[in-house]
Amino acid sequence: MTIMHKYVKNIQFENLIIFENPNYIIINKPPYLSTLEDRNDSVNLLKLAKAYHNDAQVCHRLDKETSGVLVVAKSFEAYRHFSIQLEKRQIKKIYHAVAHGLHQIENLEADQPLWVGSNKSRVDYREGKPSLTLIATLENFRNHTLFKCFPVSGRLHQIRVHLAHHKAPLVSDPAYGGELIYLSDIKKRYNTNKYKEELPLIPRVALHAEQIIFRNLETEEEIKATAAYPKDFEVLLKQLRRNT
């Protein structure tokens, strides 16, 4: 069974819902589930959402490997209301990320301009577009750091690029300098099983959309939703804490 099948096979949209009102549905997206249609996948979030509610529209995207909070509108009006807030940068999205190295950061404003390609981004001071990520340390381990990140702008792979630029590439993010992490890397006196291949603690980019805050349609009341860590992210943190 592939990693994708383990997380996505037989998935029930109802089980992903963490908040619902007459205008919006907020779900905790599992890793390896595409947000929109993907020719390589038979299942995607948009398809599941429309099966649950005919007029469902996904308000924003998360990378396929990224888990966490994602908002679905139940009508065009709700979708437009969210989009206007997104355009005006009135929506607050908090991500948690595990990076290599020890970093004690209270409030870093990573404002390096980013040049965005079709599948990858990079810091580019000549051709890059203005970008801003607010970064703070949540927890330190022996050789790794758990960060809280607030992307003010919304460039492709923004958090990953900004953290890598500040010498804190994300765990399991080879595209931007991050390496896989194994239990044998962090556990003292780890006994290797020569008959069994050791698997990484987390085989995907260690990034989770933890919280979102925005305004409801009509009432303008604040909606705040928090998504629990998926199992792989939880296991990674558990082992890092245990072996610090």
Image (spheres, rainbow, N blue to C red):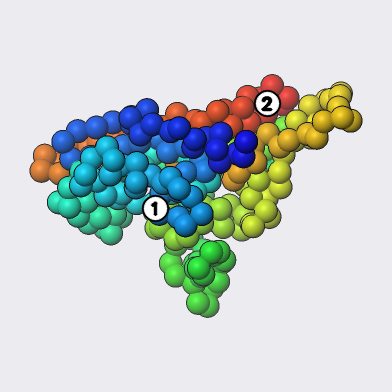
Question: Label 1, on which residue?
Answer: 36
**Which-is-in-front pick, marks 1 and 2?**
1
Q: Amino acid at mark 2?
A: Gln
Q: Is residue 201 left or right of residue 159?
A: right
Q: Nearer the viewer, residue 229 or 165?
A: 229
Question: Label 2, on which residue?
Answer: 239
Q: Is residue 144 visible?
A: yes
Disc on the earlier residue, 1 or 2: 1
Q: Is residue 237 visible?
A: no
> Which residue is pictured at 73% across the width and 24% down the height?
243
Q: Residues within 10 Å of mark 2 (few under 14, many from 20)?
A: some
Q: Which mark is residue 120?
A: none
Locate residue 35, reporting x and y percent. 41, 49
Q: Amino acid at mark 1?
A: Leu
> Which residue is pictured at 68% across the width and 34% down the height?
201
Locate residue 116, reporting x and y percent. 49, 68
Q: Is residue 40 left or right of residue 102?
A: left
Locate residue 215, reporting x and y percent. 21, 43
